Amino acid sequence: MLSLLECQLLSVTTTTLIMSKRLVSTPPPRTHFLWWLAAILCTILTVAIIIAGIVIFIGYMVIHPRVPVISVVDAYLPHFNYDQAGVLVMQVNILVRSRNDNRKAHARFSNFNLELFFDGNRIAVLSTATPYEVKKNSSVDFNYEYTSDSVPLSPSQMNHVDESLKKDQVSFELKGGVRTQWRVGVLGSFNLLCHLDCRLQFHSSNGSYIPRRCSSRSK
């Protein structure tokens, strides 16, 4: 059996070996240069995105861009009836306004096309031949005067006309749209299709227009 002295020497030797292994342990590997470069680039990109977002937000709050719209502001129905042959005879005037409420940008309108329907029949097309521009914070009006062509009515449609005349209220549907484009400072260029879908109502006794909201919405 080992003596007490030999056990103490063995314990000291073991402790020394363990400490030696700890002292000569391998140092952790260094981070590669490319990882540092990638981290720096990501940081720069993040800061740039934050700054760009702040600039755009401030620009929006200062400029406050608005979507140009078209709307019906007035109308008149001088004549509405059908003849003995069941052909619709009518005249209608519709005033359409193109409005640009942007204080710092002109707006360009193109592909303007509206269709007027009565009881599912298309009876008129309102359009402009060429694009046009509306200056900042202003509007342009187009007055459309239409006299119907020969629009034959079915018996049910003639009954609809009779009912409208009795109620002193004639209804039409106006559908279509226009493409708008405008540029606002640092925010860049905007290009939207504005769609209009509303009902126009008139008193058949005097042809007066019954006012109601009829404006386009962006899509």
Image (spheres, rainbow, N blue to C red):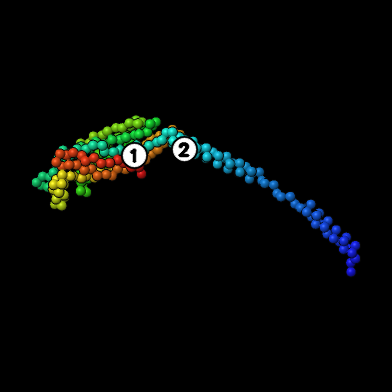
Above or below, 87 against 102 in this view is below
- Total marks in image: 2
In front: 72, or 121? 72
Q: Secondary structure at mark 2?
A: helix
Residue count near mark 2 (Cα–Cα under 10 Å), binned few <14, some 14–19, many ≥20: some
Most extreme residue toward the left is 84
Which residue is tagged 1?
A: 179
* Quadrant placement of the N terminus: bottom right
The residue drawn where x is 66% and y is 46% is 32
Which residue is tagged 2?
A: 57
In front: 13, or 212? 212
Please state if 82 lies on the left or on the right of 33 as rendered: left
Please state if 79 lies on the left or on the right of 116 as rendered: left
Above or below, 79 against 15 in this view is above
Residue 103 occupies quadrant: top left
Mark 1 and mark 2 lie on one chain; the one further toward the N terminus is 2
- The reply to whether residue 161 is visible in this rendering is no
